[in-house]
Image: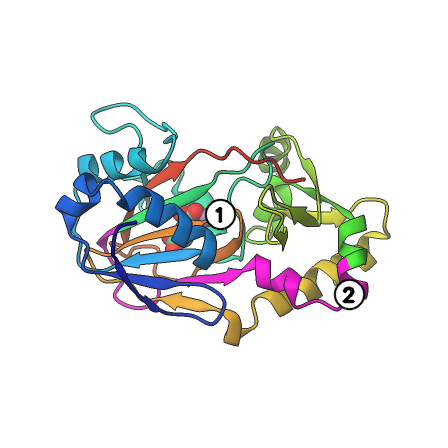
Amino acid sequence: MTVVATQGLGATVGVQVVGVDRDRLLQDDALPAFVLETLEAHGVLVFRDLHVDDATQVAFSKRLGRVEVFGKGENPEIFRITLDPAKNPMAAYLRGTFDWHIDGCTDDVPIMATILSAHAVAESGGETEFASTYTAFDDLSDEEKQRCLSLRVVHSFEAAQRMINDDPSPEELALWRRRPSKEHPLAWTHVSGRRSLVLGATTSHVAGMDVDEGRALLADLLARATAPERVYRHEWAVGDLVIWDNRGVLHRACPYDPTSARDMHRTTLHGEEPIQ
Ligand code: OGA
Ligand code: MN
């Protein structure tokens, strides 16, 4: 195993990786295994001052796993997280990143991890917050654990969009509903044996439970999972690269001005593990 120094960041997630430069990202043979293990153990990895270009980010991401392809052009694996529609035609949907969520909860298999590198940061706001869903499960009472293990939750794109647009036009609603909803267990038993809660903006209701009662339960679990003392808030500087384990981490962007130049270049690692 490669020797890489880390510093703890948050109470439930986050470590900073120290002393890794761009060359090492691509050349250190032991680094990918170290990154994947540390990600599983700590949920969020922060590299400061890397200033990677897109080709380097894609090459590094490919060392960690299968990388999703989004667009066309020179680096089709790069997806821009920006509220500027000139840079990303999907910008309006990205307002959904302001609510706590897990990426890909309406898919059969959510993505494994996300890598963002900061090309421009907001003048104010625009931090990214993270909280562990493993410790959210571990800290429940035994009774609550049993209850969560027995419940299933419906996730939908509509539920997430309603958080940012509660009065949709019939056309918007029809568009949202074209994306099929997905039912997952509330508690995910991972291949590793660890358990986590599956929560966030995509949760619509608890299957088979009174809708309001189910929503109250989900809201309470989310509020406890994301209580301020459990959250790592990343304050971005240009050149930072952050990886999070989407299987065990909730995340959200803190509000920033829609006209802000904030520009994150994102690569996405394909997931292998269904929520079960
Ligand atoms: C994402 C996301 C948060 C941010 O890329 O999936 O939620 O701070 N990003 O931009
Ligand atoms: Mn996200």
Image-based side of 195 in relation to 123, left or right: right
Q: Quadrant of residue 155?
A: top right
Residue for point 20% across, 43% down: 28
Label 1 neighbourhood size at 10 Å, few (<14), some (14-19), many (20+)? many
Label 2 neighbourhood size at 10 Å, few (<14), some (14-19), many (20+)? few
Q: Which residue type carries mark 1?
A: Asn
Q: Which residue position holds label 1?
A: 246
Instruction: Tell whether circle 2 marks a residue whose Cβ is less than 8 angstroms from ligand 2.
Output: no
User: In terms of depth relative to the viewer, which is nearer, 120 or 3?
Assistant: 3
Q: Which residue position holds label 2?
A: 142
Residue for point 48% across, 56% down: 251
Q: Mark on residue 173?
A: none
User: In terms of depth relative to the viewer, which is nearer, 170 or 259?
Assistant: 259
Which stretch appears magenta? 118-145
Instruction: Tell whether circle 1 marks a residue whose Cβ is less than 8 angstroms from ligand 2.
Output: yes
Q: Which residue type carries mark 2?
A: Asp
